[in-house]
Amino acid sequence: AGSWLWTELPAEKRIFCSVLLFSWAVYLWEAFLAHRQRRVYRTTTHVPWELGQIMDSETFEKSRLYQLDKSTFSFWSGLYSEVEGTMILICGGIPFLWDLSGQISGRAGFGPEYEIIQSLVFLLLATLFSALTGLPWSLYNTFVIEEKHGFNQQTLGFFFKDAIKKFIVTQCILLPVTSLLLYIIKIGGDYFFIYAWLFTLVVSLVLVTIYADYIAPLFDKFIPLPEGELKQQIETMAKNIDFPLTKVYVVEGSKRSSHSNAYFYGFFKNKRIVLFDTLLEDYSALNKEPAEGEEGENEETKSKTKNKKQGCKNEEVLAVLGHELGHWKLGHTVKNIIISQMNSFLCFFLFAVLIGRKELFAAFGFYETQPTLIGLMIIFQFIFSPYNEILSFCLTVLSRRFEFQADAFAKELGKAKDLYSALIKLNKDNLGFPVSDWIFSMWHYSHPPLLERLQALKDTKQE
């Protein structure tokens, strides 16, 4: 009888129910994985013997409690966003917001024929709504969890200033880009999906190019790495593998958090390397005692002096960079761009096939009008969600392969020993928990578990 009832339902009802059911299926699967991982955190209270040399029991316990707290937090925030999403769908939040946007743009003198204006108002309201509902969670995460475990370096003032800046910058990019995209889709004719895809390709290349020079500095301070031993060693290493390095920056990550990182960016012959100050033993603000005269500029960051030194020695920093440059030398960066662009093209093509289906719009409460922006939202977010899940899992698997390869590359540069100790240090500084449930790590981890990486480095460290 169940299947008969299902086929009797009108197409739009079936679409709507499928989207909701799939969303909850994914949520339950994720919750099941998180539950398995929590069990690992709860039951692994002693350092396993193979980790004896790697982690002392104090750090192990600290990281266990940190990950437990994070896991509890993500359970509740995940539940909230699933329920919120479900309520929005069931109560017709999307058509409601669309009508509201129409009223607002109508008041400003733009009638229903100005669909792009209405779309921009819709986007502004939707992003405002999600920023506001996300705020309490973000506050709790930063000022309760990260604070309790000694990572948070922000004051409330810094946090809010940052959030407002982020919102404004996002709007400055999102609104013009979306309006152009909608315009291209409107005038593009039968092959609009090719133009739309090319446009998003250009936009993403432009963003990658300007991000580090114009966008990131709005949020964090970038300082060129001072002349010295480390800079020379980095330049030599880059030269040896033909990496077209133009600048090395240190970013003041310590204003936000004591988590550490390193990355490179830039196109063609213009590459920069960015090191977080928290990665460098010599530069980390967290290792410095504030000097007499420095109190003034320190009011934004609560200076917490740690008894333990944080960050890596120069040799270890070089090993971490050897790994990062390995991603470039082995073509991982290019491969990722190609995969994401092929995916984007496929999605636009399928969008072109589906956009004419009225029942897709009807499923989400749009019976009279079929706005392009809403179509993008429905198709990319809801209809493609099963495909997106599979794709993101495949990319996670690929990412782990790339990480092993980049480790192996650093090893070929003769940096196995330093990378080995750097990985241990970074894991400790960031309180990573070295034991994981196999399904959880297979599904979520973009990097292989610490032990596996160390094992791979060791196998050939001895050769």
Image: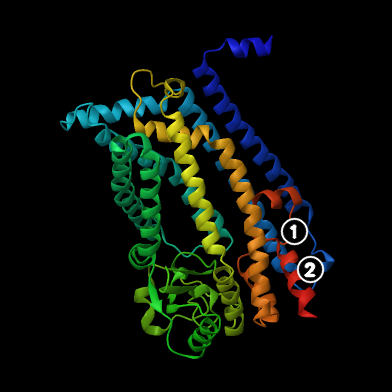
Q: Quadrant of the N terminus?
A: top right
Q: Crowding at label 1, few (<14), some or many (≥20) Cα neighbours within 10 Å?
A: some
The residue at the point 56 percent across, 76 percent down is: 321
Using the image as rendered, state which of residue 168 and residue 329 is in the foreground.
329
Q: Are marks 1 and 2 in contact (CB under 8 Å)?
A: yes
The residue at the point 67 percent across, 57 percent down is: 65
**Residue 79 at what x, y percent from top left?**
58, 37
The residue at the point 20 percent across, 28 percent down is: 106
Using the image as rendered, state which of residue 442 and residue 204 is in the foreground.
204
**N-term-proximal mark, 1 vs 2:** 2
Disc 2 target residue: 51
Q: Residue furthest right?
A: 49
**Residue 81 at what x, y percent from top left?**
52, 37
Decide if residue 384 is in sight here: yes
**Residue 130 at what x, y percent from top left?**
41, 41
Using the image as rendered, state which of residue 213 and residue 388 is in the foreground.
388
Disc 1 target residue: 435
Q: Residue furthest left?
A: 109
Decide if residue 424 is in sight here: no
| Above or below, comparing residue 125 to residue 60 in the picture | above
Distance of label 1 from label 2 (alpha carbons): 9 Å
Q: Is residue 390 left or right of residue 196?
A: right
